[in-house]
Image: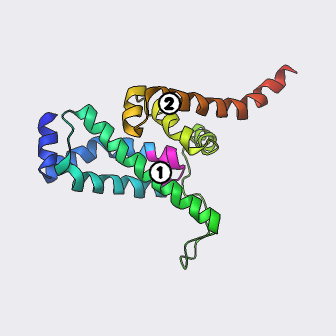
């Protein structure tokens, strides 16, 4: 794997293709969970790999674990930028001009559980959603999340905990009613 990183730093097409094969689907799934939108996740995943290609020569990662953290950092930062753009559009009612489309959800999950997870995650504030998805869905360690988000481990643990609290606060009362 160290050889792959060395070749990627040299911007070898074959190395980049191999990295794409390894990480395209996990990055897309991660971004889809964060954004709740298949089309946006596809765009952000593409942008992630474009950045990887052009930033590879300056890559300081020495192993695939560090590379993976670097890759997810890029994807997370792009998702944050997208969230900021969406906030601005909502605040100022900015919508795409002239595309003739209504803003309708593009992603139609195959399984009902995927829809439920996306709906639940959409109701969690971004600052809790990102670390929660990384921990519970993408199985990152707290240390990896802290490195990617550039936050102390204690803060990451707190953010994940509070994300779970949001879910409990919203959905536990529904399940508690059957006891009454």
Residue at left offset 54%, top offset 49%: 36
Cα–Cα span, label 2 and label 1? 18 Å
For marks 2 and 1 on the same chain, the one whose residue lies earlier in the sequence: 1
Residue at left offset 55%, top offset 72%: 96
Start-end of magenta stretch: 31-38
The quarter of the image holding the N terminus is top left
Frontmost of labels 2 and 1 is 2
Left or right, 72 with reference to 65: right
Q: Provide the secondary structure element on which disc 2 rests.
A: helix
Q: Any magenta on residue 126?
A: no
Residue at left offset 55%, top offset 58%: 106
Q: Position of residue 121 (x, y in %)?
A: 59, 41
**Pointer 2: what residue?**
155
Residue found at the very far bottom of the displayed protein: 98
**Pointer 1: what residue?**
80
Q: Which secondary structure type mostly characterizes the magenta part of the structure?
A: helix
In the image, is residue 119 above or below residue 166? below
Depth order, front residue of 134/92 = 92
């Amino acid at each position: 794997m160290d050889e792959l990183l060395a070749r990627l730093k040299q911007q070898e097409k074959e190395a980049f293709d191999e990295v794409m094969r390894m990480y395209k689907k996990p990055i897309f799934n991660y971004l889809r969970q964060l954004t709740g939108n298949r089309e946006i996740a596809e765009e952000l995943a593409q942008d992630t790999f474009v950045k990887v290609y052009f930033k590879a020569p300056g890559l300081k990662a020495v192993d695939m674990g560090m590379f993976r953290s670097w890759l997810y950092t890029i994807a997370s930062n792009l998702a944050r930028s997208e969230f900021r753009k969406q906030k601005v559009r909502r605040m100022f009612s900015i919508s795409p001009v002239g595309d003739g489309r209504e803003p309708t959800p593009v992603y139609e999950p195959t399984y009902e559980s995927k829809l439920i997870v996306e709906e639940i995650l959409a109701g969690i504030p971004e600052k809790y959603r990102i670390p929660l998805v990384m921990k519970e869905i993408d199985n990152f360690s707290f240390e990896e999340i802290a490195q990617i988000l550039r936050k102390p481990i204690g803060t990451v643990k707190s953010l994940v905990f509070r994300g779970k609290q949001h879910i409990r606060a919203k959905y536990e009362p529904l399940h508690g009613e059957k006891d009454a």
